[in-house]
Amino acid sequence: MKVKNRLSLQFTLMFAILLVIVLLGIYLFVEHNRVRSFFNKLDDRALTIAQFYLAEDNLSEDNFKHIIKKFPRSLDNEAIRIYNDSYQPQFIPEDSIHWGKELLKQIINQKKIHLSTDNKQITGIYYKDNSGNYIIIVSAIDNSGNADMKELGLIMFFFFLFSLLITFLMGRIFSRVALYPIVKITGNLKAIRSSSLDKRLSVDQSKTDEIDLLSISINQLLEHLEQSFSSQKSFISHASHELRTPITMILGEAETTLMRERKTEEYKATLTSIAQEAGRLGGIISSLMDLMQTNLDTIDLQDVRIDELVWEILDEFEDTMPGSKVNVVYDLPHEALKYTIQGNRQLLFIAISNIIKNAIKFSNQKEIKCNIFCDAKSVNVVIADQGIGIVENDLREIFQPFFRSTNAIGYPGNGVGLSLSSNIIRVHNGTIKVKSELGKGTTFYISFPIYSN
């Protein structure tokens, strides 16, 4: 079922429920007033009968004449009975209509009662007269009122059906108007393909309703998709180049060496070159594997203290990169939980060590500063070097896989380290920013949200 049809039916159903409640309330209110009005007529009729039969001597001549005029005006299917205190019928003999003693006792006790049985309404009063006390019972059927209620019910029924039809048609129009912006968005999205991800949905800047928020969210998604496609193309291009280069070198060296007999030293030189290129290839593949494994969905998380993690990194550098100068400044509170984050220790080790390693590599033995501190919401690591810096135009691209700044070509590396670090920090809900001045140095700002049990 289409959404517009479902909306129309839902709208009609809600209106039908509301209309049934309103119409039923009106019907019950009118019926209640009809019953009460007819009981008032029965009460007046019972009093008229009592005065006609019993109170002639108590009324003035004019009042009694008025009673005589009113008495013949009977009600539909009217039945009158008069009983004395001994429950004996008076003035009017009983026929098929007979009232039991229990009802008569009830009238005496309550002085007045109203009863309804089938379509008949009954009034009983206890009338005290100077000649004795009597029980007056009048029963009748409100044929006119019942006919009016039936007519009202039919009118309400047809009005209900007609209202539902009008409501459904109006709901169709309303749903079509309400869904038009979504239909328009759907049509625009159909025109967007992988080759045209630069297109965006139009957004009315003068208002910010839910449709505009949806368009903005879709535009943001398209922006991410465009960046992802661009990054994927760049990754494939650079990865292909980086992998092809050592393979080409290995095959070239091997094919050249096998073209003729050579001396032992020449074979050794060729094998050494092949081993170096194979090692480089292995490093690229290892970096790619690390890059693909930066997904925390399948990795166990643990509590990691940032200060301990940096200590471990510096301890490793003492063995692998002797002569490196890293000055660490700790500005941490006494409570260790405030600089503890939740994450994967091995991946976090790789992320931060890659940045410190780059700072050492591009600083030419100059001192590296590493500042660790906390604020109200995060624990921060700031790594600053005094190296060659990064070209301003390259700052936006340095976290792309295999990208290398133009002034870093003479230094060893394959351009995967910063991309790997960025991915690891991102999946730990952290942020990484960089500021650099060419020839003066680079500063990386890493921030992780504070973990609290």
Image (cartoon, rainbow, N blue to C red):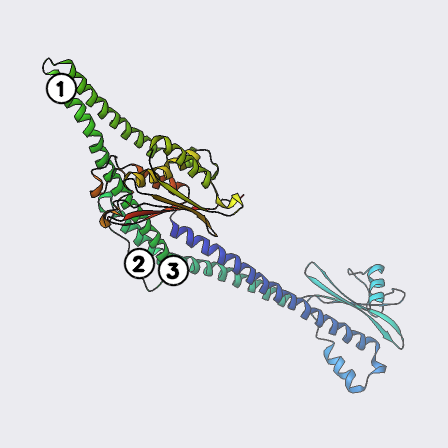
Tag of residue 203: 2
The C terminus: image quadrant: top right
Label 2 packing within 10 angstroms: few (<14), some (14-19), many (20+)? some
Q: Which residue corresponds to mark 3?
A: 209
> In this figure, what is the number of numbered marks?
3
Cα separation between marks 3 and 1:
68 Å
Nearest the eye: 10 or 154: 10
Nearest the eye: 323 or 205: 323
Kind of residue sitting beneath label 2: Val
Cα separation between marks 2 and 3:
10 Å
- Residue 345 versus residue 202 in the image, above or below: above
Mark 2 touches mark 3? (CB < 8 Å): no
Q: Position of residue 357 (x, y in %)?
A: 33, 37
Kind of residue sitting beneath label 3: Asp
Kind of residue sitting beneath label 1: Glu
Answer left or right for 85 relative to 187. Answer: right
Q: Nearer the viewer, mark 3 or mark 1?
A: 1
Q: Which residue corresponds to mark 1?
A: 255
Q: Position of residue 178 (x, y in %)?
A: 37, 58
Nearest the eye: 164 or 253: 253
Residue name at image x 56 percent, y 60 percent: 21
Earlier-in-chain disc, 1 versus 2: 2
Can the viewer see residue 377?
yes
Can the viewer see residue 418?
no
